[in-house]
């Protein structure tokens, strides 16, 4: 489809995030399984539940825009998840692996924050208030997850890995 307007671009970008979020729902259970720290496992499981909701919010975004949900293969997320899988398989001390899992997960969160930041701006400029609200709610959970992972890393995981 030819992109003619910012609205077309919004729909395309939401399709990219929709693909990315769906992939994350498949990756997070593996991350949780690979984590040794109960707190880290719990953080991944909490964000898995949130991510499932991110997928539904994106479906609501498509619906609000009067569009059929359509995925656009997100190669960047494929790559980030492939790196996470390498981390899972790595021969490492449990505490060090936990620190590495956080490193991989935070790359994913920052990618999402960048993507949501862009589509929030488009929705705002297009006057799509309901869409903006849905996207902002998810953005807030990505930011909170990133912060929680940083706190976990700094307070315990990295310290134990030393
Ligand atoms: Fe998400
Ligand atoms: Fe996330």
Image: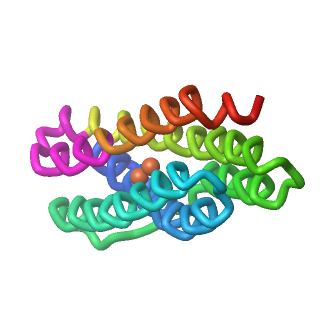
Determine the residue positioned at 73% across, 44% down: 95
**Picture layout, residue 65 above or below residue 3:** below
Q: Quadrant of residue 5?
A: top left
Would you say 133 lies left or right of 153 here?
left
In reply to whether residue 135 is colored magenta, the answer given is: yes
Depth check: 76 or 83 in front? 83
Depth check: 121 or 26 in front? 26
Considering the image in quadrants, where does the N terminus appear? bottom left
Which percent across, then down, holds residue 73? Answer: 57, 62
Would you say 74 lies left or right of 3 here?
right
Which percent across, then down, holds residue 161? Answer: 74, 35
- Magenta stretch in the rendered image: 123-139
Determine the residue positioned at 33% across, 47% down: 10
Residue 96 visible in image: yes
Q: Quadrant of residue 159?
A: top right
**Picture layout, residue 73 above or below residue 107:** below
């Amino acid at each position: 489809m030819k992109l003619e307007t910012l609205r077309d671009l919004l729909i395309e970008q939401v399709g990219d995030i929709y693909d990315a979020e769906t992939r994350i729902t498949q990756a997070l259970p593996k991350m949780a399984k690979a984590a040794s720290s109960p707190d880290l496992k719990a953080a991944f499981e909490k964000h898995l539940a949130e991510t499932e909701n991110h997928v539904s919010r994106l479906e609501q975004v498509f619906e609000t825009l009067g569009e059929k949900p359509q995925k656009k293969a997100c190669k960047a997320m494929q790559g980030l998840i492939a790196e996470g899988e390498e981390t899972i398989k790595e021969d490492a001390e449990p505490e060090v692996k936990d620190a590495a899992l956080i490193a991989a997960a935070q790359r994913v969160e920052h990618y999402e924050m960048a993507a949501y930041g862009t589509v929030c701006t488009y929705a705002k400029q297009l006057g799509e208030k309901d869409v903006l609200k849905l996207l902002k709610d998810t953005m807030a959970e990505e930011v909170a997850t990133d912060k929680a992972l940083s706190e976990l890393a700094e307070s315990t995981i990295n310290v134990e890995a030393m």
